[in-house]
Amino acid sequence: MSIDFSTRWAWAEVHTGLISHNVAIVAQRTAPVQVWAVVKANGYGHGAIQVANAALAGGATGLCVAIVDEGVALRRAGITAPILLLSEQPAELADLIVGYQLTPTVTTTRGAAVLAASASAADQTVKVHIKVDTGMHRVGVAPNEVVSLASFISSYESLTIEGVYTHFAVADDPSHSANAAQLSTFNSVLDDLSSRGINPPLVHAANSAAALANEPSRFTMVRLGIAMYGLRPGPGVAELCAGLIPAMSLKARVSAVRWVEAGEAVSYGLVRPLTKGSLIATVPIGYADGVPRALGRANIQVLLNGVPRSFAGTITMDQLMIDCESDSSVMVGDEVVLIGKQGVHSVTADDWADALGTIGYEIVCGISPRIFRRYS
Ligand SMILES: *Cc1c(COP(=O)(O)O)cnc(C)c1O
């Protein structure tokens, strides 16, 4: 559970207007297809409810989540837009899915049967989406079993097939041959369904990368995740992300300063003794907040009084230290930008990801619940 107040000198700022802006940019580029905003994992760490509302304001017409809990939380917050669950959920959750009017993904006949039973017990009709495994091999029904699954679903009066979809494994690498192979498999599935008179209104395959880079993959809807947050899906589509602006900053204040002599070292392990005397600023944020410990050894800087500066020594659980060299102007209370802009400089979650050999998704999802999100 996340906290609802904060006294801390470490916080995140989420600019919801930028979420709306990013959605609007992608919606404009992909028009006339629908944009459904992916707000799983607490809106990639940005706050699911706030992101959902901002995305809907920016032109999204639906939402996607990973698990039932996430869908229920959105409904309890009063959100009435369609909410798609991105994989088939455990059978025992069928009543909740129906009760909260979430849109389930169906990939098995057993899954369809339990949903049909819950729907008919509640005297409701439930719209479902069939997910097809066209090559990623994570979830989805095999292409040659789609028609029989669709016929099985259609045999229930309480179920309607609203959507059919798939997911790409290498959308962030647009020239990879697997994109065309998955698309071709998916198109054959659509043809098979169509020849049996099954033409679901929502056909979707694209995540952010495919929505931007792979026009034939847009069909009638795209599932927009990372690009909505202003981050890039991967280096291969970075240029297509021009105009998208990161919506979350991570900030803190200097909590202590001290002069440390040359030859002394800072923090656990006393690694990297200072080659010259330095002002060391302590900042009350650490790896328990989502600043990875490995960042202390990576080529990443933090912004303090408009100047990019390096970490001094190991990042600890609750605090980290910054090497301010001979700058004696740094004082307790000064603002530190770990992710975001200060003056003419900026550091992004993608910069952290590149320095750590991961992706921006993992960085923003990793900003822990201990960090209070301020919204503007
Ligand atoms: C998470 C997810 C998305 C969103 O992907 P992005 O790369 O963040 O745009 C889309 N579809 C599925 C099935 C997902 O799991």
Image (cartoon, helix red, strand yellow):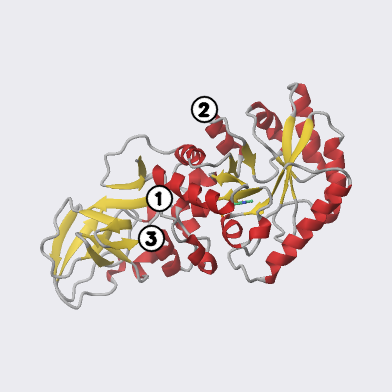
Numbered disc 1: secondary structure: loop
Mark 1 and mark 2: Cα distance apart in space: 23 Å
* Badge number at residue 247: 1
Give percent across and percent down for residue 49.
48, 37
Q: In which quarter of the image is residue 66?
A: top right
Amino acid, disc 2: Gly
Q: Which residue is drawn at 25% across and 47% down?
A: 9
Q: Which residue is drawn at 72% across and 59% down?
A: 137
260 horizontally vs 366: left or right: left
Give percent across and percent down for residue 188.
82, 57
Q: How crowded is mark 2: few (under 14 residues within 10 Å), some or many (20 or more)?
A: few
Q: Which of 141 and 8 is in front in this view?
A: 141
Q: Residue at x 58, y 33 (%)?
A: 81
Residue 41 visible in the displayed image: yes
Whether 275 is drawn above or below 334: the answer is below
Q: Residues within 10 Å of mark 3 (few under 14, many from 20)?
A: many
Residues at marks 1 and 3 touching, judged by CB atoms closer than 8 Å: no
Q: Where's the N terminus, which quadrant?
A: top left
Give percent across and percent down for residue 255.
20, 52
Whether 184 is drawn above or below 192: the answer is below
Mark 1 and mark 3: Cα distance apart in space: 10 Å
Whether 22 is drawn above or below 310: the answer is above
Tell me the residue that label 3 is attached to.
Answer: 348
Tell me the residue that label 2 is attached to.
Answer: 78
Q: State which tag comes first along the sequence, 3 or 2.
A: 2
92 horizontally vs 371: left or right: right
Q: State which tag comes first along the sequence, 1 or 2.
A: 2
Q: Which residue is drawn at 69% across and 56% down?
A: 138
Amino acid, disc 1: Ala
Numbered disc 3: secondary structure: loop
Amino acid, disc 3: Thr
